[in-house]
Image (tube, rainbow, N blue to C red):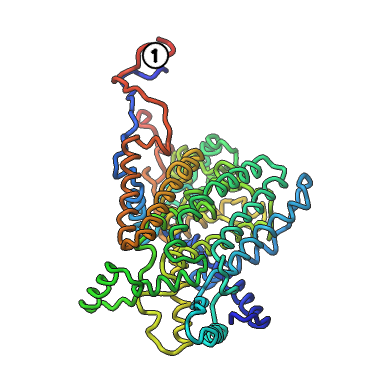
Amino acid sequence: MPTFDLTITAIVIVGLIGGILGVCGYLTLGERKISAWMQDRVGPNRVGPGGLLQPLADGGKFFLKEEVIPDHVDRIFYLLAPAVAVGTALMALAVVPFGATIPPPEPVPITTPDAVATFEVQQKAYSESFNFVLAPGLDIGVLYIFALGSLAVYGVILAGWSANNKYSLLGSLRSSAQIVSYEIPLGMSVLGVFILVGSLNPEKIIAWQATAGGTPDPVLGSVTAWLRGIGLAIGDNWWIVLFQPLAMLLFLASSYAESSRLPFDLPEAEQELVGGYHTEYSSLKLGLMLLTEYIHLVASSFMVAVLFLGGWSLFGLESISSNAIVAAVLKLLILCGKMVGLCVFAQLVRWTIPRFRFDQLMNLAWKVMIPLALLNLLAVIFVKQFGWSLIVLTGVNLLLFVGAGVLGARTRGSITNPKRAVKKMPPGLPAGVTYAGR
Amino acid sequence: MPIAESEVTWVQETKLGLWEQLYIPALIDGLKTTLGHMVSRKVTEQYPEQEPKMPLNYRGVHRLNRDAAGRVKCVACYMCATACPAHCIDIVAAPAPAEWQKDGREKYPETFVIDELRCIYCGMCEEACPVDAIELTTLYDLTGFSREQMVFDKEKLLSVFDTTTKAGTDPVRTQAGPLGAASEVPPEVK
């Protein structure tokens, strides 16, 4: 499909948006169900069998609610904000692969015999293949997603500023500070992946992970051979998470911050801010604002699956069938399964960790995550430059992680949580403290 | 009142070691707790299908108890109406019928009306009653279409007694004798 065809593109757009909106609807149900189960409740179970039609009821409710536009808002930006938020979130999905993909062929050196013929054959084969991605072969792929991810903050800022409400403004200021801060570790943690693969194209990143066992890496080659020897034919999958576990941790944490999920949900901390930046919105506009966060969650889960967890590859399971259609469906299911798993993990984490304080949040980004990402990047550069085995990166990542923990313990956690010096108090009242009436 | 010095404890913040500073072990610990709750038994009661079992001391709709002969137990002493902080009980007393008088009953309530909307369900009428004639049942889902429907007269209150005792949800909790201590002759007069 890489040759542009209006009909196919239109079908993919409709399918993609419909699918993503459906997934987001059911994520809201999943969120409510999981939170209910964790609190020993049953959760929504009245609409449809087991509450399965609850998202439809919720959506219908959003449509039927009265739409209130307060008099004190700046109407143009107030109406623009949800559109910007949803638009940028949906546009980011254009380059996210959601199924089987084939990377564009490498350029053919002109010195090879029949260079032109080889090139044409490769291009013909590529243009006849079908890629499960809206805009295939985009070489700046991941960069485009990051660009739109940082544009998404405009929706939040416009909503908070135009609402002319202190709580909305505070929420949007928090959100913009948080998103701008976490953009840096988010981008920096995946730089290592780009250097390893040598491309920003998500399809190439998946292909590298699916076949990295074939790269001339002595240690990995012997490990694969040994695994084959004991009968574990795991395919040639070497997911990047094996070499970059710390980068994946940083990316995951930053993407939670980007989509303002707990423990980083300060922009919409209900206990402090009424509702955050969408306090003044009602009806479907509120629905769009809430939907945006779920689209961000889905998009960032896809990104984690593509960048670190091998995309559509699953230890040879993806190539179990030689039938092209079955294989395509299998790869679609594997990638979407990974995405749903990551979304569910985010919801488990939501009800497990309490919210950070704002200074802790900022300290975590600037004093911990950015230096760690930078050191990890340095390690990747060294490994690539000197041609060491990729296993070195795993060790370096673990060392960095434990090293950060040791440093944190040595400084008594004052890196992320600066404290005043507290003198050790003897038992009883401190000297000079008396109570009234004595 | 000032806090006694002996009751004050000064607490130092706990020192976090390497394990806690790594944060991920703590996260896994937390996930263990939350996942444990996910699969544990749920406490939700499916209300309309599954009726809750109320404790016997629940204070719901009132009833007027009957005595062994099936007559209203109330002796129209007005103590419940006096005790009622919401003034929702209205009693009109009348001399008891001749055959009742043989059992020592002088008065009986000609009408006994409780405004269930005014009532605050404090249970003071039950406490005040010397003959255990008025009791609060475990009926919790009292509804009606008008205010008039929610004003319960003597027949209605007696029918509450009939239904609740027949259903077995509220056994008669009386501890006094057939007519209660108040209706009996004090010992020194005998």
Which one is in front, B60 or A427?
A427
Which one is in front, A68 or B51?
A68
The residue sitting at 79% across, 46% down in the picture is A71
Give residue A123's position: percent from left, percent from top: 55, 83
- Of all residues shown, which one is farthest toward the left? A230
Label 1 is placed on what type of residue?
A: Val
- Of all residues shown, which one is farthest toward the front? A111
> From the viewer's perspective, is residue A266 above or below residue A433?
below
The residue sitting at 27% across, 67% down in the picture is A219
Give residue A352's position: percent from left, percent from top: 41, 52
The residue sitting at 67% across, 40% down in the picture is A166
> From the viewer's perspective, is residue A341 above or below residue B128?
below
Quadrant where the C terminus of chain A sits is top left
Task: Say whether residue B110 is left or right of residue A34.
Answer: right
The residue tagged 1 is A433
Quarter residue A224 falls in: bottom left
The residue sitting at 33% across, 28% down in the picture is B11
- Of all residues shown, which one is farthest toward the top? A438
Task: Say whether residue A402 is left or right of residue B2.
Answer: left
> From the viewer's perspective, is residue B111 above or below residue B39?
above
At mark 1, the secondary structure is loop
Give residue A52's position: percent from left, percent from top: 52, 71
Q: Chain of mark 1?
A: A
